[in-house]
Amino acid sequence: MSNSEPKVEATKSSLLFGNLTAIVWIFLGTFGCWLINTLYGYLFLAFSAFSIYIIVRRLMCNSCYYCKSCTKGIAKLSILFLGANSIPGLSKGSILGMVVFVYVVLMIVPSSLLVNSLLQEFNLLNASVLAGILSISIFSIVVRIKKGRQTYHSLTSSVL
């Protein structure tokens, strides 16, 4: 890393908002899967929480060299959910792979189960949970598109 590349600085608001977004998204997906089958709900919660907060977080935290204060990858994970497409210490390909994985796990899996359930029999609760999952997914996509190529530092100054 060159000395001119900015380091990640974790602010309380970015940590809170990014992780709150991730947690709400995980719990909406868990509830949606749980409505279909209780076992699916528990499996989804275990898989999504483990894969995002253990695996993806660890992949983002490859070196403390890129952060001003060590958060063990939580800061980078939160800014990933805030729509940053450029994070110091990570290639654009790595970020894209993580974003695609997150969207598949948190949007596609529970949404497809709920849509399948709704096609068999309409249920207002299932439709409401599906609407919640799609709302947070669309919000996340819009923020990501709107932010475009902004880095973490310009992102946090414009969002927070």
Image: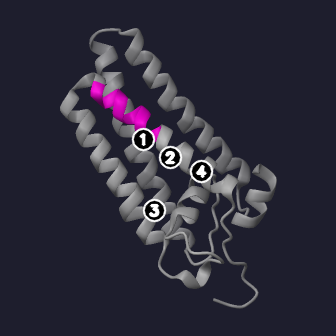
- Mark 1 near mark 2, Cβ–Cβ under 8 Å? yes
| Image depth: mark 3 or mark 1 in front | 1
What residue is shown at x 41% (from left), y 54% (from top)? Answer: 101
**Would residue 66 be visible to someone looking at this image?**
yes
The answer to which of marks 3 and 4 sits earlier in the sequence is 4
Q: Classify mark 1: helix, strand or loop.
A: helix
Q: Classify mark 2: helix, strand or loop.
A: helix
Q: Amino acid at mark 4?
A: Gly
Which residue carries the number 4 mark?
A: 18
Tell me, for residue 12, which label it has, or none: none
Is 149 placed left or right of 158 in the picture? Answer: left
Tell me, for residue 26, which label it has, or none: 1
* Residue 158 in the image, given as x and y percentages of width and height: 80, 53
Q: Amino acid at mark 1?
A: Ile
Is 83 placed left or right of 44 in the picture? Answer: right
Which residue carries the number 3 mark?
A: 97
Q: Amino acid at mark 3?
A: Gly
Quarter residue 44 falls in: top left
- 3D distance between C-alphas at marks 3 and 1: 18 Å
Q: Is residue 144 above or below residue 67?
A: above
What residue is shown at x 37% (from left), y 62% (from top)? Answer: 54
Q: Is-magenta flag for residue 100?
A: no
What residue is shown at x 42% (from left), y 63% (from top)? Answer: 56
